[in-house]
Image (tube, grey):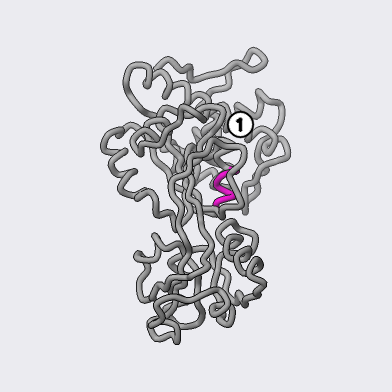
């Protein structure tokens, strides 16, 4: 590997391993847990961090018998330390890619209701083909995931948004469009209906995603455009829990049609004036890692025009 394990600061050596130790302590709030994560004895980890603090001329952590937390200097140092580690990792991955090997990290984000891509299957096939890549997955809201891609915390994300919203600050490829359907309990008064409209649903108590999220906005806009209001008494963050509340006949929901067959214990009903959701794949505009490029290629997602 052609990446050096040290960088020079004020004529002293700052080792990448020291940065890894700092990051581990910051994330675990514990020297003991950080040492376990880094597979070193605690005394060695503490010694290296103390050495780095002497080189920098400031303590990075406030240590007490009860807790460990970043000092203001440590909080200022952490983003640059993380960027250094990511740059070193990226450099190694680029060298490996130049000789035909995909390695490094692949950080992926998705919303729970993505249906255009079977991501577990796709990631399983990717790992089998590129075993040197460390894959991580983060589930969240579309707008948060897009921001994390823009900031470099994620390599690729799969989102769902209303037709009135398009991800910004990232490269975008539209995967699919899907209408929402009503989801009700099997014993609900509407369960046997072939189709319903928004006016009929407006009389029901709803469960939905938190207000302001992209997944919620598409439904709110549809009811507002129809001149209707609805009662959203339950706010949750996962489609599975939405289905559990609906199955208990506490409420009804609106979810993407392509995702509805995955839900257990509920009935899906067509909505004649349903809103449409767009699913997107997004990645960084400023440069893709070799692993991100390989995943997008495996999914036949074009990147040249972005």
136 sits left or right of 57 in the view: left
Secondary structure under tag 1 reads helix
Give the residue at x 55% y 81%.
Answer: 204
Q: Is residue 216 above or below residue 81?
A: below
Q: Which residue is mark 1?
A: 50
Give the quarter of the figure containing the N terminus.
Answer: top left
Give the residue at x 52% y 33%.
Answer: 20
Give the residue at x 37% y 31%.
Answer: 294
> In front here: 295 or 200?
200
Q: Which residues are magenta?
A: 142-147
Q: Is residue 133 above or below residue 205?
A: above
269 drawn magenta: no
> In front here: 8 or 40?
8
> In front here: 94 or 265?
265
Q: Residue 215: name its quadrant.
A: bottom right
Q: Residue 301: name its quadrant.
A: top left
136 sits left or right of 23 in the view: left
Magenta: main secondary structure equals helix
Give the residue at x 71% y 35%.
Answer: 73
145 drawn magenta: yes
Circle 1 packing at 10 Å, graded few (<14), some (14-19), many (20+), is some
- The spot of residue 251 in percent (x, y) is 51, 79
């Amino acid at each position: 590997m052609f990446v050096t394990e040290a960088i020079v600061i004020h004529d002293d050596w700052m080792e990448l391993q020291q940065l890894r130790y700092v990051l581990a302590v910051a994330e675990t709030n514990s020297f003991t847990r950080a040492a376990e994560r880094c597979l070193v004895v605690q005394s060695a980890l503490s010694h290296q961090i103390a050495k780095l603090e002497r080189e920098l001329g400031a303590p990075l952590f406030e240590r007490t018998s009860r807790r460990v937390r970043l000092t203001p200097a440590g909080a200022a140092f952490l983003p640059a330390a993380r960027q250094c580690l990511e740059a070193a990792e990226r450099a190694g991955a680029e060298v490996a890619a130049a000789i035909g090997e995909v390695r490094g990290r692949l950080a992926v984000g998705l919303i729970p209701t993505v249906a255009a891509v079977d991501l577990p299957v796709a990631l399983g096939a990717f790992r089998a083909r590129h075993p040197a890549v460390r894959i991580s997955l983060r589930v969240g809201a579309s707008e948060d995931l897009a921001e994390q891609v823009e900031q470099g915390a994620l390599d690729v994300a799969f989102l769902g948004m209303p037709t009135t919203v398009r991800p910004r600050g990232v490269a975008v490829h539209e995967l699919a469009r899907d209408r929402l359907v009503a989801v009700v309990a099997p014993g609900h008064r509407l369960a046997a209906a072939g189709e319903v409209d928004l006016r009929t649903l407006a009389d029901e108590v709803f469960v939905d995603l938190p207000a302001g999220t992209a997944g919620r906005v598409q439904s709110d806009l549809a009811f507002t455009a129809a001149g209707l209001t609805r009662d959203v008494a339950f706010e949750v963050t996962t489609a599975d829990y939405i289905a559990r509340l609906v199955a208990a006949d506490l409420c009804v929901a609106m979810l993407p049609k392509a995702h509805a067959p995955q839900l257990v214990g509920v009935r899906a009903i067509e909505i004649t004036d349903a809103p449409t959701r767009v699913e997107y794949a997004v990645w960084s505009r400023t440069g893709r890692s070799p692993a991100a490029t390989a995943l997008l290629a495996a999914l036949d997602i074009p990147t040249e025009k972005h």
